[in-house]
Amino acid sequence: MKVGKQSALLTNVYLGEAGVAAGPKEKNGPLYNYFDKTYEDLYCNANTWEKAEMQLLTDAIKMCLKKNNLEISDLDYYVGGDLNNQLIIGNYVMRDYDLPYLGVFGACSTAVESMIVGASLIESQFGNKILVGTSSHNATSERQFRYPTEYGGQKPASLTFTVTAAGVALLTNQATDIKVSALTSGKVIDAKLNDPLDMGRAMAPAAFDTIWQHFQDFGVGPESYDLIVTGDLSYYGRDMVVRLFKEVNIDLDSNYKDCGLLIYDRDNQEVFAGGSGCGCCAAVTFSYLLRKLREGVYRKILVVATGALLNSVITAQKESIPGIAHAVVLERMA
């Protein structure tokens, strides 16, 4: 049921178990124990960066299926995407599965965009069991959006460090202890920032816009949630969101975190402003946050995945970097 301008209430969409695979930097981070599988190096037992990311996504799919006691034949769709041109990671992984596939792109907001598409299919009774997921890899992203790691270029403190991880979760119409109860779809917001080495602040206005619209559509405020979490704004982007809300007399600081700050230890890991990438929000949400919901630490979370809608060609043409953010509400039912 549509609510307000950009939101909807969901009546019959639940979150099952999820699978998360991660790389070496993530293995050495504070959320290590929440991941299902980790690798010692960026190659992930493959021989190219792109094939390493395919391996991560394959691992996440297999673990998700195993934890939910499902076979591919039990599913209706896979909905997901990645940061690589033409979604090659998802495209190439899904050629091995006999399953309808909907490839979506929302940059780093893809995890929640996939959930919105999957939840809409279930709510409309077009499917009963749907896998949603995404992936990112530090080396594939650096090569495509900035400079290859081998280039050795100096990086500023504002840089967000692309997470090497994949996360896949089950959406189902069969009741579980976690309900996907609402969603808010975001708009493209362009703050006219153009630094690809500072994407946290480029995405922050979109995060503000979606969270603000969510509050307006449902008539709620930050106190309605145990936790509000953005996908990958990291240190500088999160700070901007907090300051933007202060301008409308809302204190968002106390129960607001960012996945890019949760997945790494900035004091002891060389990750600059914090984590970013499709895999950032997916890995944190489908492991750490899901566990905390099931343990009763949180009962209601607003997850707001954020994305910078750029590519290397358009930024070379001196264009700005528009952002987008999509939100879902996860509630513990038990």
Image (tube, helix red, strand yellow):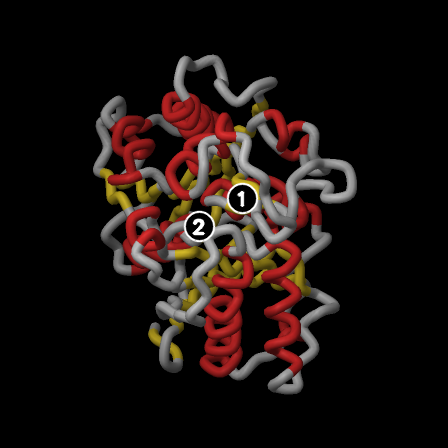
Q: Is residue 38 visible?
A: yes
Residue at (42% x, 32% y) in the render? 140
Label 2 Cα neighbours within 10 Å, binned few <14 / some 14-19 / many ≥20 = many
Q: Seen in the image, is 215 located left or right of residue 190?
A: right
Residues 129 and 320: in front is 320
> Which amino acid lies under the numbered mark 1 shown in the image of this protein?
Cys
**Image quadrant assignment for residue 120:** bottom left
Is residue 312 shown above or below 71? below
Is residue 155 shown above or below 306? above
**Given the current orientation, which residue lies at the most extreme right position?**
267
> Which amino acid lies under the numbered mark 2 shown in the image of this protein?
Cys
Name which of mark 2 and mark 1 comes first in the sequence.
2
Rendering coords of residue 280 (x, y %) = 53, 44
Residues 61 and 275: in front is 275
Write down the residue under mark 1.
Answer: 280
Residue at (26% x, 22% y) in the render? 96
The local secondary structure at tag 1 comes to: helix
Is residue 280 shown above or below 59? below
Residue at (27% x, 43% y) in the render? 103
Quadrant containing the N terminus is: bottom left
